[in-house]
Amino acid sequence: MASTTARIAIDAMGGDHAPDEIVAGAIRAQAELGVEVLLVGDPQAIESSLKQHTSSSQMEIVPAEDVVAMHEEPLVSLKRKPKASINVAMDLVKQKRADAVVSAGHSGAAMAAGLLRLGRLKGIDRPAIGAVFPTLVAGKPVIVLDVGANVDSRPKYLEQFAVMGSVYSQYVLGMEQPKVGLLNIGEESTKGNDLAVRTHQLLEENPRITFIGNAEGRDVLSGRFDVIVCDGFVGNVLLKFAEAVGEIVLQILREELPQGIQGQLGTALLKPNLKRIKQRIDHAEHGGGLLLGVAGVCIISHGSSQAPSIFNAIRLAKEAIDNQVLARIQSKDFQGEQQSAASTTEE
Amino acid sequence: MASTTARIAIDAMGGDHAPDEIVAGAIRAQAELGVEVLLVGDPQAIESSLKQHTSSSQMEIVPAEDVVAMHEEPLVSLKRKPKASINVAMDLVKQKRADAVVSAGHSGAAMAAGLLRLGRLKGIDRPAIGAVFPTLVAGKPVIVLDVGANVDSRPKYLEQFAVMGSVYSQYVLGMEQPKVGLLNIGEESTKGNDLAVRTHQLLEENPRITFIGNAEGRDVLSGRFDVIVCDGFVGNVLLKFAEAVGEIVLQILREELPQGIQGQLGTALLKPNLKRIKQRIDHAEHGGGLLLGVAGVCIISHGSSQAPSIFNAIRLAKEAIDNQVLARIQSKDFQGEQQSAASTTEE
């Protein structure tokens, strides 16, 4: 696939700003990234969004009759709505008409649709959502997984997350021999809850990864780790907290910097520097999470995504395709973890 | 106790900057807060720290021969070192020679010493460490608990944390009818891991608190909640992440703001505004966590605490004493939770 043009199915109906912002991001991606985009959803709504742009490039629309709303129970509605946009998008990958799916819709539904329609990679018990954070060290992002696909994880799942995260870090983020950490509340191997203590041992014994020990909350953004694994509950809390903190800091800067006459003058002078600061702090610049472990490239964007985030999500998808992330995960030897690779859905 | 001068025992040997910074914070607190401070530790070391200050006020030194170092296993060393400073400080409260303990030493040791020497309040199965965060709404702090005393919590523990946190929020932080949230990964009552789902139900049924629903990571600092309860694993990860994020943002500001000639001029003009921003972002301004649920007021400060943090920790202790937090927790009706109030230490 890497040698031909990557074809990416976009759930045009998913997210707070669908379809306008989704379509806008897709148009830009097709123009700038050399990918082919398939817009999945209500043809009328998509056409009307497309008309707002002067872009001359053709975009294929794949009709889908339904959409899974944010408040719906994912498994129930996916089954009740087989023609929902997220289902249709996943089917395109299954039928090899697309190489990847990008969705800013209901993240639980995207994950479930990926699992149900595409299945899991061999040797993976549970898919995980990975989120990429910038760190204090420029050019050295960290992938944290899982940030919400699984709660009540088992040690074996976290071990598989470590392997998948290492592949992603090496072949998409470009880190040589990625350093893996286990999110925990102390440095010692005996620290933490039952899950952490048992996972620590598995990671230490795994020859396929470079495990360098526990990562505390303060270490996540330090740049010391390339991959950090955790249960989806704590990962999700961390992700949403981090996103909010970025916004809060920017709000504090907006409130406090221009106070007083000196403040207004100083702020005006600092405009270019403040723009750079916003870029370093703002999580929205970073696109989306990768659903790792299903048999297809799936990027799950934030529900609040606007065009720039969708563009970045499509870029992520292209990188995962070009760098053959799935094949590389699959080529890792998962022997010893396969006996329980039976169930597909939530236990 | 509230009518007389509060007497506060300080573990002078605990923390990265002990005893100098601890003593400096204690001197300022005794001078400004109208409290009486007892410095617990090696008399020679404390005397030598005291000599660096010109303060004329008398401070009592309570000798302690030993100290629990940061790397030690708390339970083992507390038993092997009965005269360790943290043990001696707790004994002062037990003997009613002091009303509270402040320590920046080994936090696990402080918690264990509190439990072993003072015991638990009636009806409390597990003590919790509460951390107070500033929120987006000025003057509306939120207390998050537990941030590290317990991992692998049970629903019942979190319910007790909610009651203790509500008392603290109301009588120390001054919030009327504190709004309680359960840290979770979604808004719906069915969301989350097993612990969250079961705790949600307990909180909904508890008439002693005002439970307003789940709090996601993004809601922690929003000001919508006054009390947020969680297991100590996720709370500790969150606390340490939040502390680090504050430092990272300040570092980004220091790096980016003064770039270029315009940047240098603008930064100079913004000096007073930047100082205010630092105060709003910097977690170190906020003092320490309260160990809630033991039969004594115990403030656990960060290991890196310097004099201002110690001063703030002593102020917190004074407020907890003056507002009779322990008696108010004790006066809450914990019927129905008492059958299991037997074990004192980790299971």
Image (cartoon, coloured by chain):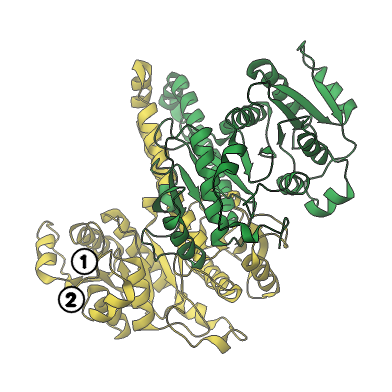
Chain colours: A yellow, B green
Of the two numbered discs 1 and 2 on the same chain, state the one appearing first in sequence: 1
- Callout 1 amino acid: Met
Q: Is residue B251 left or right of residue A64?
A: right
Give the image location of residue A317, x and y in percent.
Answer: 37, 68
- Dot 1 and dot 2 within a common chain: yes
- Residue receiving disc 2: A64
Residue drawn 48% across the image and 48% down it: B228
In depth, the one of A38 and A345 nearer the eye is A345
Mark 1: few, some, or many residues within 10 Å (few <14, many ≥20)? many
Badge 1 element: loop
Q: Is residue A337 visible?
A: yes
The foreground one among B341 and A336 is B341
Q: Amino acid at mark 2?
A: Ala
Which x, y percent locates residue A219?
A: 60, 51
**Disc 1 versus disc 2: distance between alpha carbons?**
9 Å
Instruction: Name the disc covering residue A117, or none.
Output: none
The chain under label 1 reads: A
- The number of discs equals 2
User: Does residue B341 appear to the left or right of B56 in the view shown?
Assistant: left
Query: B179 above or below A340?
Result: above
Left or right: B317, with A110 as reference point: right
Q: Is residue B252 visible?
A: no
Front-most of residues A129 and B141? B141
Crowd rating for badge 2 (residues with CA inside 10 Å; few <14, some 14–19, many 20+): many
Q: Residue at image x 59%, y 54%?
A: B232
Contact check, label 1 and label 2, Cβ < 8 Å? yes
* Residue B115 pos. (x, y %): 73, 48
Judged from the image, the secondary structure of the residue bearing numbered disc 2 is: loop
What is the quadrant of residue B313 in the picture?
top right
Q: Quick check: A191 above or below B327?
A: below
The residue that label 1 is drawn on is A13
